[in-house]
Amino acid sequence: MRLTVSEQRVLVEAARECFGPEARVLLFGSRTDDLRRGGDIDLLIELPESLSAEEAARIRARFVAQVWRRLGERKLDVVLAEPGEEDEFVQTVRSQALPLEKA
């Protein structure tokens, strides 16, 4: 995984502050491969409860702003998954992602 412990901590703390203490953060994409270079930070955030589309967009923007304030502007791709999400893309990501734990 190509994120430092400090970066992981920032991402998890920001997600839990914005989406609730039960939010779970998973890293997917190129940053999961230690042999690759560069790449954006692809995150799947599993939500503790369902949100309206407007609320999800507002909170996602707040999350990105918090991460940028703490880590500097990084290219973030954030996918939100509600409880019981059965979307094929989300299921594929879940099977390949690495969970970030608050260090």
Image (cartoon, grey):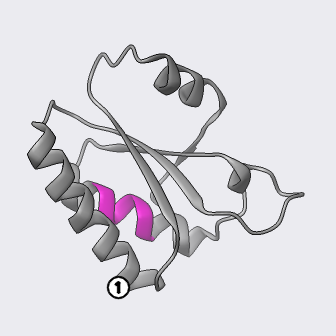
Residue count near mark 1 (Cα–Cα under 10 Å), binned few <14, some 14–19, many ≥20:
few
Q: Main secondary structure of the magenta part?
A: helix
| Rendering coords of residue 39 (x, y %) | 69, 63
Seen as rendered, the residue at the extreme right is: 35
- Residue plotted at (59% across, 69% down): 5
- Residue plotted at (72% across, 52% down): 30
Q: Which residues are magenta?
A: 10-15
Left or right relative to 82: residue 71: right
Quadrant where the N terminus lies? bottom right
Q: Nearer the viewer, residue 35 or 55?
A: 55
Q: Is residue 21 magenta?
A: no
Residue at mark 1 = 69
Mark 1 element type? helix
Left or right relative to 10: residue 15: left
- Residue plotted at (61% across, 63% down): 40
Corner quadrant of residue 36: bottom right
| Rendering coords of residue 12 (x, y %) | 40, 58
Q: Is residue 103 visible?
A: no
98 in relation to 6, above or below: above
Count the numbered circles shown.
Answer: 1
Amino acid, disc 1: Arg
Q: Is residue 69 visible?
A: yes
Q: Nearer the viewer, residue 103 or 13?
A: 13
Corner quadrant of residue 68: bottom left
22 in relation to 9, above or below: above
| Rendering coords of residue 41 (x, y %) | 57, 60
43 in relation to 49, above or below: below
| Rendering coords of residue 79 (x, y %) | 40, 43
Q: Is residue 14 magenta?
A: yes
- Residue plotted at (61% across, 37% down): 97
8 in relation to 73, above or below: above
